[in-house]
Image (cartoon, grey):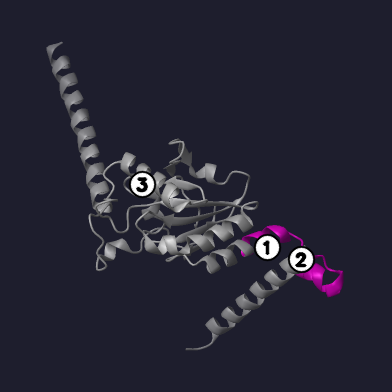
Amino acid sequence: MKFLIMLSFACSSFMLNAADNLSKYAVMEAEKYNYTAYDADDTAWYGGGINLSDSNRYFPDFVFIDPVTEKKITSADLFKGNRAVVIEYGNVTCPSFLSKENKMTQLYRKYKKDVNFYVMYIRENHPGRNFPEHRSMKTKIDHAKKMIEFDKIEIPIIVDDLKGTAHQALGNYPNSSVVIGKDRMIAYRGKMNVPEQVEDSIKDLLAHDKMGAKVSLVDKANSMKKGERSPELQFWYEVILARTIENKTQKSLSSQPK
């Protein structure tokens, strides 16, 4: 009996130590991710994430926080309404994010009926006295709230966890953007957020949905005179035709001997 008690105590101590080590490891990872000062020479800052050259581009399962309600949001929640998703990286100390927010807001207003937009709050790009590096989720959420207040951000914000799990998995660039189809397959990822490229990707996804699996809007439009086409049909016809020509040109160029 004494032996069993000692064994039970030893197991309990082992489990507590293991849990403590995991906790310390998580803290170390968070501290490493949330640097105290930006260093342009830190190559670990750039790259990584899902390899978009692979066939598997499925958007993984993450857990975010809504800074307004402070409730959890899962990856599946992002696709509410069975829509495509646009995610841009942002934080209150990122001048690149703030400089493009006007254009991204215009895209949001233009496409929000068909596409779900989010700003994923990542680590502070340039931590300082007023907005230091994140040492707790409370700090990170508070910063996100202040950004909404100060900069009047219209696009819904989702806060990544303290270790930057989603940020690092998707590519830990400072101000990137990701476009995901409603099938949860990543269609586009820009190292830097370029609103014009984001809109092109949105148009591609919406055009694909409009075409459907068997119906070609190009074929349908070609059988009609321009004046007979509805404005919507003409719009998608031009989008799809432009993409088709662009793809053929790229394939032709890539097949030429170097």
Looking at the picture, how far across and down is residue 109, in whole percent? 60, 55
Q: Is residue 51 above or below residue 143?
A: below
Looking at the picture, how far across and down is residue 191, in whole percent? 42, 66
Mark 1, residues whose alpha carbon is within 10 Å: few (<14), some, or many (≥20)?
some
Camera-side mark, 3 or 1: 3
* Residue 217 numbered mark, or none: 2
Q: Secondary structure at mark 2?
A: helix
Q: Quadrant of residue 136?
A: top left
Q: Secondary structure at mark 3?
A: helix
**Mark 1 residue type:** Ala
Q: Secondary structure at mark 1?
A: helix
- Residue designated by label 3: 143
**Mark 2 residue type:** Leu
Stretch in magenta:
204-231
Q: What residue is at 59 percent from the left and 43 percent from the top?
A: 80
* Residue 207 numbered mark, or none: 1
Distance in Å between CA atoms under marks 2 and 1? 9 Å
Work out whether residue 77 or residue 91 is closer to the camera in this orientation and state it: 91
Q: Quadrant of residue 252?
A: bottom right
Distance in Å between CA atoms under marks 3 and 1? 37 Å
**Mark 3 residue type:** His
Q: Is residue 224 visible?
A: no
Work out whether residue 1 or residue 162 is closer to the camera in this orientation and state it: 162
Q: Is residue 171 magenta?
A: no
Drawn side of residue 106 relative to residue 75, left or right: right
* Residue 181 numbered mark, or none: none
Q: Are marks 2 and 1 in contact (CB under 8 Å)?
A: yes
